[in-house]
Amino acid sequence: MLLIDKIAYESKLRDISPGIKTIFYLLLLVYMFMVTPLFQGIGIIVIGIATIYTAQLSVWRYLKWLLVPLPFLLVSFITIIFTISTSKSGLIFSVHLFGRYIGPNAASLSMGYQLFFRSLGCLVCTYFYSMSVPFNQILLVLRKCHLPSYLIEITMLMYRFIFILLDEMILIHQSQSIRFGYHTLRTSYQSLGLLFRVLFVQSMARYNKMMIALEMKFFNGDFPLN
């Protein structure tokens, strides 16, 4: 069982209907889109505390998972707030480069600020939902919404293989770190190349094993979810 599914099965909200939790999740997303950054920040704190309590996680573990997508949010924030102009009027501060002025203005800073908190709020809501609803129940909710079966099956396969690859990558990285594979810059490049090569080989091996198992079970192209 994947770790995130294990957390969802052990959640204090496990006995609540997945349909109700899905509706609540959608309402939380609407809330994050509609309110101002101040209330988004309050919502982030409240939902984060609720996630830690219901999923029975440590604060450090939750924050560590929250830091994973943070670089992508920061890159998006930086690209939004900086604008290019022919003059530095209106810019809070600027850098002159190739005859242009690069810097943030009040409008871009406000937009970046709003989008950052909105994205972080939606991320926190998604963490809350994924740690309280096991993935097979999410698939059943999607089926009840009458989504195409092939879309649900692709979602299921992508979810499973992504987390399997992540687990394999973490194990290989830990094994390399124990052997001082990332001690210097040179060995880091070598270990990283070896990691990707082994990960590719193992992913293909897992795919072949899955196809053999499906053929032995007379797979006809449909994954039953109930």
Image (spheres, rainbow, N blue to C red):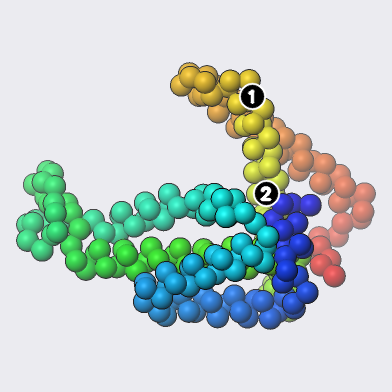
Q: Nearer the viewer, mark 1 or mark 2?
A: 1
In the picture of the structure, the residue carrying the numbered disc 2 is 163
Q: Earlier in the sequence, mark 1 or mark 2?
A: 2
Q: Residue 178: which numbered mark, if any?
A: 1
* Crowding near the residue tagged with mark 2, few <14, some 14–19, many ≥20 C-alpha atoms within 10 Å: some
Could you tell me the amino acid type at mark 2? Phe
How many marks the image carries: the answer is 2
Tag 1: residue type?
Ile
- In the picture provided, is 195 more to the left or to the right than 142? left
- In the rendered view, would you say 204 is above or below 78? above
Taking the spot 42% from the left edge, 80% from the top edge, the residue there is: 34
Residue 97: quarter of image: top left
Residue 65 appears in view: no
Q: Is residue 30 left or right of residue 208?
A: left
Q: Nearer the viewer, residue 57 or 123?
A: 57
Q: Which percent across, then down, holds residue 96? A: 10, 46
Q: Residue at x 58, y 20 (%)?
A: 180
Q: Residue at x 18, y 62 (%)?
A: 105
Question: Can you give x and y, in whole percent of width and height, for residue 162 in the image?
Answer: 65, 49
Residue drawn at point x = 27 percent, y = 68 percent = 110
Vertical order, 164 against 182 (above or below): below
Compare residues 29 and 59 and report the one nearer the observer.
Answer: 59
Say which of 11 and 133 sits in front.
Answer: 11
Is residue 12 something that shows in the picture? yes
Indicate the position of residue 62 as horizontal and vertical percent values. 58, 55
